[in-house]
Image (tube, helix red, strand yellow):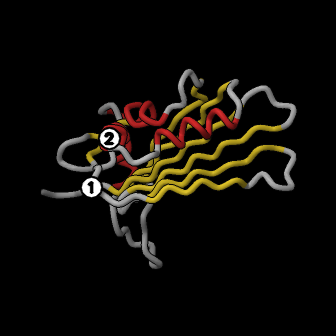
Amino acid sequence: MRLLASVFILLFCLGASSFAVDDNEPVTLMGTIVKWRYPKSQFNGAAMSDAKNMDASEKRTAPSIMLKTTMTTEDSVEDVLKFYQVLLKRDPKIDDKLGDKAEAGRSVIFSDESDGRPFAFHIISVNTSTASTTLTITRGVDETETRITWKRYLQLQVGG
């Protein structure tokens, strides 16, 4: 535990938010978030942390990180959903922008959980073999902003 704390302190002191997913691309918190940012949205905090990928005995199984932020916009939930439907359509240029390899498999699931609730509540799940991204899009009836909560799990590659 002390070693883990020392590693995080060292990373923080070194500028903290840069890890490698593969040999070519370092992962940075803001560098990753801007790829997923809804246009002209406001950021309301962001964080990168250890994703604690462990087996049932709490032994680490794979180095991994979790990135997260919340964005807000005055645009409607429908406009936000349209943006992400276009962004997440398979296209080699867009895949590269998001950091996904065009040849890699990926699933994208849009889910509307608004039924019976007094607010709009949508979840977008994007999964590959080494990454999982969740966008939760909400807006209350009397609210003036749409909230986009973004979380991304990345499994890191270690070694050569």
Q: Residue at x 87, y 32 (%)?
A: 142
On the rendered structure, is 28 left or right of 119? left
Relative height, residue 1 to residue 84 (above, below): below
On the rendered structure, is 133 left or right of 92? right
Q: Residue at x 42, y 34 (%)?
A: 35
Frontmost residue, 87 versus 139: 87
For the residues bearing labels 2 and 1, Cβ distance under 8 angstroms: no
Frontmost residue, 91 versus 122: 91
Q: Nearer the viewer, mark 2 or mark 1?
A: 1
> Considering the image in quadrants, where does the C terminus appear?
bottom left
Q: Is residue 46 visible?
A: yes
Q: Which residue is mark 2?
A: 27
On the rendered structure, is 84 left or right of 14? right
The tag earlier along the polypeptide, 2 or 1, is 2
Residue 75: percent from the left, percent from the top? Answer: 68, 26
Q: Residues within 10 Å of mark 2 (few under 14, many from 20)?
A: some
Q: Residues within 10 Å of mark 1 (few under 14, many from 20)?
A: few
Q: Residue at x 43, y 69 (%)?
A: 54
Q: Which residue is mark 1?
A: 103
Residue 58: percent from the left, percent from the top? Answer: 45, 72
